[in-house]
Image: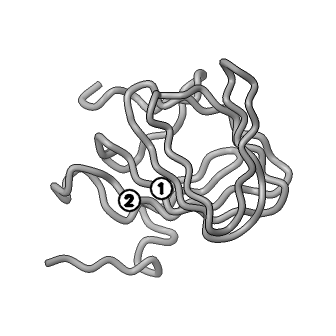
Amino acid sequence: MKTVRLDDIVGGPQDVHGETWNSRRLLLADDNMGYSLHDTLIHAGTATKLWYRHHLEAVYCIEGKGKVVTVDDGREWPIEAGTVYALDKHDKHVLHAETAMRMVCVFNPPVTGRETHDADGAYPAPGG
């Protein structure tokens, strides 16, 4: 059994900041769960280009409002508290935050902890 407190993550090495986001990584690859679990904040008024070509991601919005636009087809998906979206096809997408957003994110395979997005919006391949 393991417990993790968000208060113990904030300000530490598992509190990773990007230009438009802040990801507090609660469970990582070393926890041997088969996925990683993140509490992520998205800054209001931002657009974040993402493409998890090496990972599958499920996102549960618990605060805020925005939309996801899938790049290949231009389709818009409204996101607000209580909405889950799953990038089950390694979808290239842009997350637009109308307001500040708080998300619970799950990645498979799990991240190791300090990853940030590359120029394509992806995390590195596991072991890469």
**Left or right placement of residue 31 versus residue 80 in this view:** left
Pick out the residue farthest to the top. 72
Q: Do the residues labelled 1 and 2 touch (CB within 8 Å)?
A: yes
Q: Mark 1 points at which residue?
A: 105
Q: Distance between the residues labelled 1 and 2?
A: 6 Å
Q: Where is residue 22, by image quadrant?
A: bottom right
Residue drawn at x 50%, y 72% is 10
Secondary structure, mark 1, is strand
Residue drawn at x 37%, y 65% is 26
**Left or right placement of residue 125 versus residue 12 in this view:** left
- Counting from the top left corner in percent of width and height, residue 38 is at 45, 59
Q: Name the residue under label 2.
A: 37
Secondary structure, mark 2, is strand
Residue 51 to residue 109: above or below:
above
The three-letter code of the residue at mark 1 reads Cys
Please identify the quadrant where the N terminus is shown.
bottom left
Residue drawn at x 43%, y 71% is 9
**Left or right placement of residue 107 versus residue 47 in this view:** left
Residue 35 to residue 90: above or below:
below
Earlier in the chain: of badge 1 and badge 2, it is 2
Tell me the crowding category of disc 2: few under 14, some 14 to 19, or many 20 or more residues within 10 angstroms, Cα based.
many
Tell me the crowding category of disc 1: few under 14, some 14 to 19, or many 20 or more residues within 10 angstroms, Cα based.
many
- Counting from the top left corner in percent of width and height, residue 66 is at 77, 53
The three-letter code of the residue at mark 2 reads Leu
- Counting from the top left corner in percent of width and height, residue 121 is at 58, 29
- Counting from the top left corner in percent of width and height, residue 68 is at 70, 41
Q: How many labels were placed on the picture?
A: 2
Which residue is at the front of the view, 95 or 28? Answer: 95
Residue drawn at x 29%, y 24% is 128
Q: Where is residue 73, by image quadrant?
A: top right
